[in-house]
Amino acid sequence: RVFKQMAGQLQGMEHDRQEIVGRMPMPLDAFQSRPSAGEALSAVTLEALQAAFMKAWERARPVREVSVVRDRETIPERMRAIERLLGQGRLSFVTLLQRAGRKEVVTVFLAVLELMRMNRILCYQEGLFAPIWIERMRTKDL
């Protein structure tokens, strides 16, 4: 009876474990000399990014769905476009969203977040309610 109870508990644990997705260990040497996310973001807070996203979302024109299928820009394509624009100097988050529909707002927002995660751009805000500026991460910033 004890073995049956233990077998039942182990089956329950096995079922719970099947719901977990793991990740293989990876070397962290590349991250030791980089600034933390807090340092890289400077004065940009999550609330500021969220407010900028919501403002752009509300301003974006709803796109009426039509039967014509058009190519949508992917996040990697938008990331490359942002990096090309940053070759001319810093730019504000709002300039990336000019004449953007809702789908484009989401694509730009995700591209900016991915570039920040990859430490390829730096976002900062010079004051409360000031524009959010984006610039290319310099090698000495890493």
Image: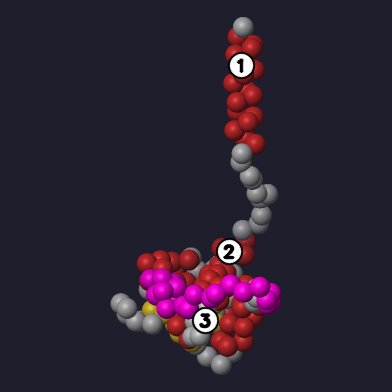
Residue 53: in sight, yes or no? yes
Q: Residue at x 64, y 12 (%)?
A: 4
**C-alpha separation, residue under disc 1 versus residue under disc 2:** 43 Å
Q: From what the image shows, is residue 84 above or below residue 52? A: below
**C-alpha separation, residue under disc 3 versus residue under disc 2:** 34 Å
Which numbered mark, 1 or 3, is in the foreground of this view? Answer: 3
* Residue 31 - label: 2
> Where, by quadrant of the figure, is residue 39 drawn?
bottom left
Is residue 70 on the magenta stretch?
yes
Q: Earlier in the sequence, mark 1 or mark 2?
A: 1
Disc 1 secondary structure class: helix
Query: What range is drawn magenta here?
Result: 51-71
| Relative to 48, 21 lies left or right | right
| Relative to 5, 56 lies left or right | left
Q: Residue at x 65, y 49 (%)?
A: 23
The residue to which callout 3 is attached is 100
Looking at the picture, which amino acid does disc 3 mark?
Answer: Ala
Q: From what the image shows, is residue 122 above or below residue 36? A: below
The residue to which callout 1 is attached is 6
**Percent coordinates x, y for residue 127 in the rendering:** 32, 80
